[in-house]
Amino acid sequence: MNKQNNQKTVLGVIKKTLKMHPVIIVFLALLVIFGSIYPGSFFSPINFKAILRQFVTLTLFALGPSFVVLTGRLDLSYVGVWMLGGTLVWLLKPILGIFAIIMIPVTGVLTGLFIGVIQTKAKIPSFILTLSLLVTYTGLAALIAGGYPRAVDGYGFITAPLIRAIPSTFLWSVPLIVAAVFLMKCTRMCVYLNAIGSNEEGARLAGINVDKYKILAFLLSGIFTGIGAIILFQHLGGSAQVELKLNNIVWPLVAIVLGGTPLTGGSGGPQRTLLGAITFTIFYRGLYLTPLHPTMITLLVGIVLIVAIIISARGLKGVTVT
């Protein structure tokens, strides 16, 4: 009898988990499909390492903005923080030496605080505000660097191998992931951000300092983006970039939405973004093993984005994302 009860309990937990995180079903299905068609290539050490590398890129770009999306807002400044911060590292390294890398998280923190205050006090739609800031940062980075990517030496230790077959940047990202999940699971902030995303006026009437927590969400986005961008700086080439690539903007948003955080907010968070990031990575790396032309792969990725947006927009009727 106890054994049967335990089995029912386990099945109940699994069923509840899959209901709460349907992306897990997609993830498992992709593993089975690509693993069956390309068993040798898909499960190879080379592909495993490539999956981890892309997962790191998506996660570190998407982790911070996940806090903002919870409130029903958007933060598109993450790529700009990485680009402008990297350019400032190149500019100031002759003066500050290896400590110039601190300019990236400083840029992230100041950006998050600036966006939070302006968006909250001036009521400027976050999409327009952060997109404008992203374009401004791109222009500043290009102006400072003279229009060319600038290589920066001295940070090779970030990508230096620590454990064979596992990218060291993945290991560096683990503490950030743990910190983000801890904030969502073990603090009251999760309840407050979800409440603001679900019903801002109701949260205000419930006694939540809405403006304070909206600013905090953007600040956390800037902090996590800034620290993560230190890892990404070396992970993506160790140079100050001046070219804005659409994939770097869009793919993290796909990871957030696929993971189960709707653009209207009210549920989800960084822990779900992790599921979205690994699922999208498996999908993308699996497609790369097929004989499909790169343009067809781009088309399929675009379709996934459209589907993800439609799914996230199921609760958008009558709601405006600010």
Image: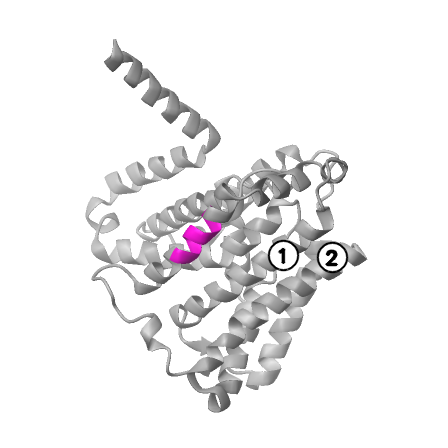
Q: What residue does disc 1 label?
A: 218
Q: Is residue 6 above or below residue 225?
A: above
x, y (%) of residue 212? 70, 52
Name the residue at 66% across, 45% down.
Answer: 72
Q: Which residue range is magenta in the image?
A: 175-181
Q: Is residue 122 left or right of residue 111?
A: right
In the picture as drawn, the residue positioned furthest to the bottom comes out as: 94
Q: How many marks?
A: 2
x, y (%) of residue 316? 68, 36
x, y (%) of residue 11? 34, 21
Q: Is residue 193 left or right of residue 268?
A: right
For numbered disc 1, what is the local secondary structure? helix
In the picture as drawn, the residue positioned furthest to the right comes out as: 122
Front residue of 64/37: it is: 64
Can the viewer see residue 296 in this picture?
A: yes
Q: Amino acid at mark 1?
A: Phe
Pointer 1 and pointer 2: residues touching (CB < 8 Å)? Answer: yes
Q: Is residue 266 left or right of residue 34?
A: right
x, y (%) of residue 199? 71, 36
Q: What residue does disc 2 label?
A: 119
Q: Is residue 259 above or below residue 251?
A: above
Q: Is residue 120 left or right of residue 259?
A: right
Name the residue at 72% across, 60% down.
Answer: 117
Can the viewer see residue 303 in this picture?
A: no
Earlier residue among tags 1 and 2: 2
Residue 317 on the magenta span: no
| Magenta stretch, overall SS | helix
Q: Amino acid at mark 2?
A: Gln
Front residue of 187/193: it is: 187
Name the residue at 51% across, 48% down.
Answer: 183
Front residue of 189/57: it is: 189
Find residue 279 and report its image quarter.
top left
